[in-house]
Structures are given as C-alpha cells and as structure tokens.
Image (tube, rainbow, N blue to C red):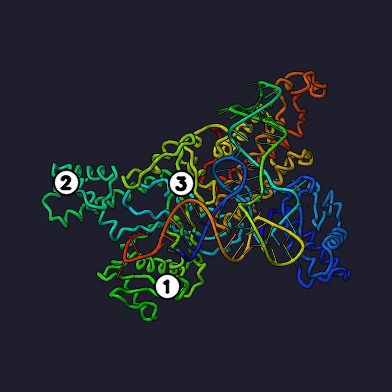
Amino acid sequence: MAQGVVQDRIAQVLTESLRFAQQRGILKLEQMPVINLEAPKRPEWGDVSCTVAMSLSASERRPPFEIAQIIAEHIHERDRVFSRVDIARPGFLNLTLKPALWMEVLRHVETQRDEYGHSHLGQGRRVLVEYVSANPTGPLHVGHGRGAAVGQALVRLLRATGHEVASEYYINDAGRQMKLLGVSVLARYLESCGQTVPFPEDGYQGEYIRAVAARAKAEQGTELLSLSSNDAEQRSREFAYRELLALIRQDLDTFGITFESWFSEASLLSSGAVEEVLKELESRDLLFNQDGAQWFRSSAYGDEKDRVVRKQEGEYTYLASDIAYHRDKLRRGFDLLVDVWGADHHGYIPRMQAVVQAYGYPKDRLRVVLVQMVNLLRGGRKVEMSKRAGEFITLREVMDEVGADAAKFFFLMRDSNTHLDFDLELAKQQSQENPVYYVQYAHARIASLLRVAASRGIACPLPTQADLALLVDPDELAIIRKLSMFPVVLEASAVELEPHRMAYYLRELAGLVHPFYNKHRILPPVADADTTPAALNDPPLSTSRAPEAVPPGLTGARLALMWAVQQVVRNGLTVLGVSAPDQM
RNA sequence: GCGCCCGUAGCUCAGUCGGAUAGAGCAUCAGCCUUCUAAGCUGAGGGUCGCUGGUUCGAUUCCAGCCGGGCGCACCA
C-alpha cells in the first residue's frame, strides 16, 4: 500500500520500534502487524495516528495503552522524527512530526512532477475497460455521458497505478435495434418523399431520425423508392448506422474521449465466432436444449437461473454474442475486464460472471461498474425528459451549455452507483458554489500568482531551492499534509474503481488553498515594495487588515508550496480527464 | 414474491480492513471586507447515521429482521 513518502517513513520508524521491543523480549509479535496510519480528525490528535497497539492487544494479551507506551518508548531517535508522541485513551498513538519531515512531500512532488501520486501497484497487469457501448441508434444522452466520464477516468486511474490499459467500445450493430433503426429512418425518408406511411410500432421517434432521413435523401435522392422494401430497408439501416456512429464518435471526440478499439457485435456473428463458442460450450455440457430453445447453464456458476442463448426461431440472443465477446476479451490475454454498464443492467452481472467462470477464470476477473441515472436540474428544478417521445437531453446539448470539463467533473463527483443531481445552472456558474470552477480556479489562481511574481521580478523557487523550514504555519502544514494524501487517494480511486474519491479530494484541497490565499500573503505588498521596507515591521494602524509581513525567504517558500499545490491539482484533474487551465 | 442498489444536518452528498466528540459543500443566521485574480472572508447553529435486535472493549461501518425509495426479474438490447 502506497501511503505517501512521509507515511511510509513513519511506518518504517514504527516497525523498527516494534522490532526493537521484540528483540528485548518485551513484545512477542508472532507476526509483524501492518502499520495502519490514518489522518486524525482533530488537530490535537497530531498529524498522523496509528491504531496498531489496539490491534495487537489481543495477541499480546496486554492492554492497548501499554503496548502503545512500549512502542513510543522504543522509537529510535524519537526526537529527530517527532515533535510529539501522545498516547490517547484506548491506545491511539498520536504522532506529531517535525515540520521538516513534511517538507519531503514538496520535494517529492518536485522530483515526480506529472508522475506524483502514480504507482506501480498494477505491475503491468493488462486491463480492458469497455465503456459507453451505446447502441448506434441515436445520439448519446446524458446517461451515456456519465458512463463515458467514468470509463475514461477509470482508464486513466488504472494507468496511473501501473496497469496496462486498453479501452474499447462495443457496438451493438446486430439484431432488432438495428432493424428498427432501419425501418424508422426509411419511414421518415418515404414521408419526406411525399408518401404517407404508417410509422413502425416501437420505431425510434426522435427528431434526429428525420434529420438522418433528410441526409439520406440529400445524398441518394429518391433512389430508394425504386428498390424492394427489403433492400430499401437495408440501405436505410446501413446509412443510418454510419451516420449515427459517426455522430457518436463526434460527440465523444468533443467530450475529449477516444477509444483504442471499436468492437462490432455483427463481426462476431459473421465470423462464426458466436457459433464456435456455443459449440465449445455445448461440448462441455454447458448448453442444453429445452422448449425448442438453447440454454446456457449459467446456474452452474451461481446465476439464479439458466439463460437462453438461441431462441425458438433460431436467432441468437444478445447473451450469445456477449458470451463470444467476453470470450474474445479473455483470449486477448487481459488480466482484468472492467465493464461500465447502466445500472438497469445490474441483473446481468451474475450471468456474465458465470460466463467468465465457465471459461475457467475467477468471477472477479470481470468487474462491472454500474452507472446510475442522471437527474438534470436547472436552477434546482428538474428538467423533464420523456424517453417515449424520444425527447431526452443529449450529451451534446449539455456540453454546449456547460462545457466538457464541467460536465465531466459533475459526472464524476458522486459515487457512480448513486443517482446524480446535475444542475446545469450551477455547472455554468463562475463562483465557488460550483465545484468544478472552485477546483480549476485553484489551479488558475496559482498560475496567475506565479505570473504576477515573475512580472514583478520575484524569483519563484522550486521546493528544493526554497527555504522550506520557513513553512511553519499550521495552515501551510495542513496543505502539505493534504498533498501527502494524494497518492493514497489516487490508489484507492483506482483499486475501488471509484473516481469520485479523487473529485472529492480535489474539492477538499481547493478548500484549503483558497482560504490560505485569502488569509496569507504570498508576495510582498506592492505599495510596500516601493516605500521603505521598515514599514513592514511597523505595527499597523488599522488593526483589522494588517498585511502579513512576508520576508523574501517566506515568499519563496510559499511560492514553492503553491507550485506544488498546482502540480497536484493538475495531476488530480488530469486523472479525471478534466483540464487544468492557467486562466479562467 | 425474489434479487441488487440506496436511506447520514433543511438540501446534495463524503465516510471500504470496525476506532476517539460522525464530516464537506450549499442553504440559514451573525459579524467583517474590497485583496497577489475577481465573482468575497471569518464564525455559529444544525444529527436518534431509516428502525429494531445481534456480534464486542468499541458499530454509520459487520450480521439478521423490518420500514421507506429506486432498479431488475424476457426466447429485448
């Protein structure tokens, strides 16, 4: 577990202390415990607290408080590392570090730069993240947008933690939906040619279908009228498919998302892959025939019932191609498959995990991330959508209104498995109530600060060049402690497949930086710079708003601190796929 | 009926190996203020962590049951 440089160091110190006590026969320690460190909630509990004494209590047959004392007494060169070591009630070890130790965090940010927070946790394991995968039967709507943001963030998070990641879009270009698309477009096409035709039942109602039909007419004229209805339908289908897939790609492109591969469901059918896979399962007695249909024995792997793969009429079900698809993914040698699905598909998880197990893999070789519904609001009022009438808010509309960055950040702000209230008015606002703005502004504000400093000829030292010993203010240390948690948050977001943790972290970091900026001075006041420096030391006449005295060394140290903050904010936003602007 | 998810401050939500007096933002209230980038700053109030039991030194967290909301239970995708 990566915990950040400082935490690693403390864990090391405490482990040494335990060993020392063990050597002296004071502790038995049949096995070395994990040193679990946490950030205490209250400042008087120190910088870092450790619960290891309590977890050792049972095996050592001693009160936790005593064990904590023993650990505290055996810390090597205790005064060099800690300014305080307290023991609190049950057996908490509350540690306050020498400020100098925290400065290591800033130097670490400097050496790692864009890689700060990244790790080798994944050890190069290969992961395939499949996401969006919306049917090419219409434009992407907000729900797809959330899935896209989540999927992309997962790709980036996994990469940052040492996984080799590929991203893929599965195109459902076979079956009933495609057929419906074809007849819907054809109907609108015929309408536009002056024919009165009944609109197909269950056809796609959306206005975009008319637009596609209009383009078909513009391109092909009345040519389709001379074809047989089957041919005309096929032509419409193919045309609509190309148009809509291109539209989806464009929307994703605008959203800043690209896929390494696009995988066609139809290709699985035409290549015979589906048949082949079913034959294989049949030979292993995992398929059986009943009621004229063919079934997959998914109940053998924990699904609540068996599932049809081939209908009575002989057509394959969606599951059949999905079995072939996941077979294909596994064959490509991925160590982990991540599927991002709409939450309404949650019932499919057991059967897909059954598929994975049927191929001899543990079921968690496939991890499914569910994305819940997005509630669009405008100034607190719900934006009504009716799917039946084909009226839904598209991702495009949302991007046009609030921008891709804001949309992404909002999509990622909450646990993807919970409903999301997305207020369009809020997402557009340039105020601190808007979390996207608040976080991005932290980055831009520091950029501006560095620009101003440069224009005034003030040196902006990097952490290794600054006198960091001057950073002793609790507000400064609080920010540095926060920066030290970045690697932990990044890793947890990746391991749990929960990008919202990072979004929260960034909000919290910005929540420390803005007040710091307002409270403390970083650059010397302009007016004072022109007058006598002695003015700085005079007691201010107006008591309330005394500009803080900032000697040059402190300015340098604070600039170095801000530089590190900026780097971390940028790294965090990057991993979420959100830009880090230098100017708002 | 069965299964999954959710239930934490007025609102929207964090809180995953069980830890200390349960946190944040918004809203509300009270003061202050006009800046290195600006759309503000500081503080306060606000809670039976859905309910009930269990596990234990300790439960928002784990288990069981109930209540409430969402979703799913297709030879649709």
Amino acid type, callout 1: Ser
x, y percentage for residue A420? 50, 46
Residue B33 in the figure: left or right of residue A447: right
| A153 relative to A384, above or below | below
Name the residue furthest left.
A226
Q: Chain of mark 1?
A: A
| A215 relative to A86, above or below | above
x, y percentage for residue B15? 63, 53
On the question of residue A158 being in view, the answer is no
Q: Earlier in the sequence, mark 1 or mark 3?
A: 1
Amino acid type, callout 3: Val
Q: Earlier in the sequence, mark 1 or mark 2?
A: 2
Q: Residue at x 50, y 59 (%)?
A: A165
Q: Chain of mark 2?
A: A
Question: What whole-number distance in Å separates the C-alpha atoms at marks 1 and 2?
Answer: 45 Å
For the residues carrying marks 1 and 2, which lies nearer the camera in this image? 1
Q: Nearer the viewer, residue A368 or B3?
A: B3
Tag of residue A190: 2
Q: Chain of mark 3?
A: A
Q: Residue at x 77, y 28 (%)?
A: A549
Amino acid type, callout 2: Leu
Placement of the N terminus of chain A among the 4 image quadrants: bottom right
Query: Which residue corresponds to mark 3?
Result: A374
Q: Nearer the viewer, residue A560 or B52?
A: B52
Residue A462, picture quadrant: top right
Query: Which residue corresponds to mark 1?
Result: A298
